[in-house]
Image (cartoon, rainbow, N blue to C red):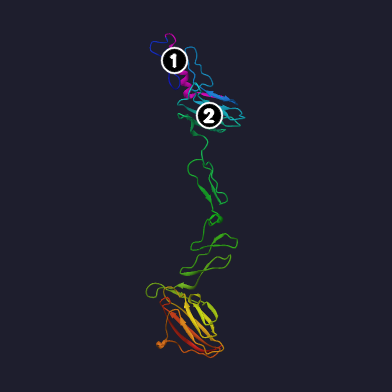
Amino acid sequence: MAADTALLDLVTPTQGDLTGTWGNVVNNGITEYVDIAIAGTTTFNGDGAVTLVNTIGNASATNITSTSAQYAVVRVTGTLTTPKIITFGSAGAAPYSKIYLVDNAATGDIVTFKAYGQTGVSVAVGEKCFVYYNGTDIVKAASSTVDGVSTISFGSTGLTPNTATSGAVSVAGTLAVANGGTGLTAGTSGGVLAYTASGTLASSAALTANNVVVGGGAGVAPSSTNLLAISAAVTTGNYIKAIGYADTVTALGNTGAAINLDVTSGGVFTATLDQSSTITLRYPVATGASSFTLILTNGAGGPFTVAWAGGSFKFPGGAASLSRTTTASAIDVWFFFTPDGGTTYYGSIPMKNLTA
């Protein structure tokens, strides 16, 4: 007696059997089933659950129906008002290793394709996918619908991706300033970027070599100036050449019994000695040299004394202090210089007894 294979239930004729019927059995039980297993499509229209189980041919007929599980392609058409459930296998016919191409050509709802007793996969309207039985359930192997990210958008950044559906995605446009871009597609060689009055970035004109950059104020692009520039080499190297500059004048007011003078807060200081006072020098440049001028006016009620603190002080002739004017309202102009970051100060009074 002819048996059948474990998966597709193809007839396997036994030697010596099927006398006179061998051709019918082979055609109905093998040839026709191989045909649908490779290229056959079964179509289901509209709602209604479907169960696919193997059928077996014999000498009399193929016994193939629309629900024969051996088909290669399962197609759904018509209008679905609810998910269409297609089950592979049944309680009496367990599913087996099999590949299907599932085509949801219907409208309205999904197709659920699953193994008996399992949850299966969803096939969206318009989707075509290959599925297979993995020993437990039906799973997708490939789909005409892209899984994961299918579109890309750059919002209001000013950038626009192309519409490529495969391969590399190119991006065009200009990144907006609000998103970290410059808003520019080109700039001026040798220029710098600055915000305009409207809040956009623009390139300044080319800056002159070896000059310094100065701000132009709100809404005005920076420019360069030769008021402070790198000069040509003297003997070796370059140096900074100041065409003109202005010192910061810091008014200290009345000294009181003690007052602090912060060296780096200005180049010129003014103070009124309203009593004997100790003036402490603070915050010179950390390394290198710094200097300042102090215009000291005598207040009424003197004479008063001045003492210095904040470093080691050296005066002309090795004097411990300098002879200064003590007349009320008289002015002395002091000059201090430190070459070592405030460790030692060298002082003098280049102008004395000036009238207020």
In this view of the protein, which residue sits in the foreground, 280 or 143?
A: 280
Residue 110 rendering spot, x and y as whole percentages: 57, 32
Q: Nearer the viewer, mark 2 or mark 1?
A: 2
Q: Which residue is situated farthest in the left direction here?
A: 236
- Residue situated furthest front in the rendering: 257
Residue numbers of the magenta segment: 19-43
- Residue at 47 percent of width and 86 percent of height: 349
Q: Is residue 67 above or below residue 157?
A: above
Q: Nearer the viewer, residue 172 or 55?
A: 55
Q: Quadrant of the N terminus?
A: top left
- Marks 2 and 1, how far apart at CA: 31 Å
Which type of secondary structure does the marked residue at label 2 adopt? strand
Based on the picture, tell me whether residue 7 belongs to the magenta stretch.
no
Residue at position x 48%, y 79% in the image: 280
Q: Secondary structure at mark 1?
A: helix
Residue at mark 2 = 113
Would you name the residue on which mark 1 appears? 26
- Residue 12 at x, y percent in the picture: 42, 16
